[in-house]
Image (cartoon, grey):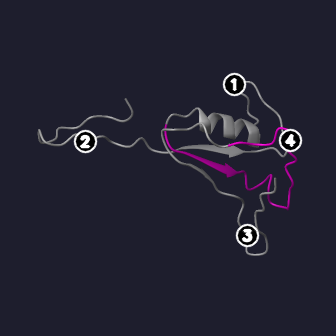
Amino acid sequence: MLGRHFQCPASFHCLAIAPSVVFKVNTIKDQTDPAGSATMSLRDAIHRADAARRPATITFDSKVFAKVQTIKAHCDGFQLDANHFGLITVTGPRRADRRCIWRQ
């Protein structure tokens, strides 16, 4: 069961929501890296977020994405839909002069 149980009145069932886990994309390559690798692609981050079994956030390394970058997906694209235990939030690199664009 997700979360931890706390002492609650008999008429309530309390459940603590697990904190969000963060996955930081640090490459523009569309690849799958082995577990424990220092490299995290967007594909890796999505797969790990889907499997997290709790809320997840995908962010982008500020050094790698200091300038405008394009991540070109393989023909199968990216799909966020398997994490039934919490939201997956994707937070793109932010600067006043840039925006993050998702194209399919």
Question: Nearer the observer, disc 3 or disc 2?
Answer: 2
Q: Is residue 69 left or right of residue 78?
A: right
Q: Amino acid at mark 4?
A: Lys
Single out the residue that lies furthest toward the left.
10
- Secondary element at tag 1: loop
Q: Main secondary structure of the magenta part?
A: loop
Q: Which of the two labelled residues, at mark 3 and mark 1, occupies the earlier sequence position?
A: 1
Residue wearing tag 1 = 35
Q: Residue at x 73, y 33 (%)?
A: 38
Q: Which residue is mark 2?
A: 14
Which residue: 70% across, 65% down? Answer: 94
**Circle 2 — which element?**
loop
At label 3, counting other C-alpha atoms closer than 10 Å, the crowd grade (few under 14, some 14-19, many 20 or more) is few
Residue 33 in magenta?
Answer: no
- Amino acid beneath label 3: Arg
Residue type at mark 1 is: Ala
Q: Residue at x 88, y 39 (%)?
A: 75
Q: Position of residue 16 (x, y in %)?
A: 33, 42
Q: Would you name the residue on which mark 4 appears?
A: 29
Q: Earlier in the sequence, mark 4 or mark 3?
A: 4
How far apart marks 4 and 2 lie (CA) works out to: 43 Å
Q: Quadrant of the N terminus?
A: top left
Place residue 66 in its image quadrant.
Answer: bottom right
* Category of crowding for the residue at label 4, using alpha-carbon neighbours closer than 10 angstroms: few (below 14), some (14–19), many (at least 20): some
Give the mark, 2 or 1, whose residue is nearer the N terminus: 2
